[in-house]
Amino acid sequence: MPWWSWLIIWGALVLALLGMLAFFAVWLFRKLMAAGREVSALAEKAEVLQRRSDELRDPAFHSAVFADLGELQAQREQGRSDRAYARQARRDARVRRGKLLTNADPTQFSHLTKRT
């Protein structure tokens, strides 16, 4: 083989290497940019979660030992009445659903009994 064929072979190899390096550099750059966008979105979501957790944080504990007896009785009665109201609302909703089921018009389901 003549000496110039070696120059052509090595030149082609060097160009292929440079092309491959450029391709992987662009590929890596795109991956890094996408990762950066995801990190910024994650930081925004973490900030929202932090604000929500601050809003949902339990209030400071205050011992009932030193509280006024009248206030404690009033709070207890208020809690009882709230629970009773919620129980009654659930019961009313159950009764309403039951009445809808028992008073359903059977003709609206006649298409299910037809034989084809």
Image: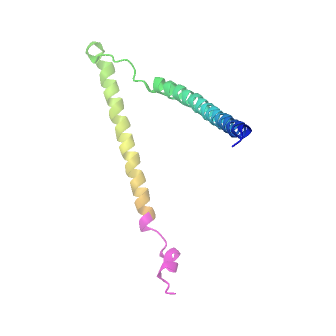
In this picture, is 18 found above or below 114? above
Q: Residue furthest left?
A: 65
Tell me what residue is drawn at x 34 percent, y 25 percent: 75
Give the colour scheme shown.
Answer: rainbow
> Where is residue 74 shown, x and y percent of the image?
34, 25
Q: Bounds of the magenta span?
A: 101-116
> Where is residue 10 shown, x and y percent of the image?
67, 36
> Where is residue 42 shown, x and y percent of the image?
54, 30
Q: Residue furthest front?
A: 2
Q: Quadrant of the N terminus?
A: top right
Residue in the foreground of this view, choosing between 71 and 13: 13
Tell me what residue is drawn at x 66 percent, y 38 percent: 13
Q: Residue furthest bottom?
A: 116
Secondary structure that dominates the magenta span: helix
Q: Is residue 21 magenta?
A: no
Residue in the foreground of this view, choosing between 38 and 70: 38
Q: Is residue 105 magenta?
A: yes
In this picture, is 11 found above or below 44? below
How many numbered tags mark residues here?
0
Tell me what residue is drawn at x 38 percent, y 41 percent: 85
Residue in the foreground of this view, choosing between 53 and 105: 53
Tell me what residue is drawn at x 30 percent, y 15 percent: 68
Question: Is 109 left or right of 23, judged from the image as shown?
Answer: left
> Where is residue 82 shown, x and y percent of the image?
38, 36
Residue in the foreground of this view, choosing between 7 and 49: 7
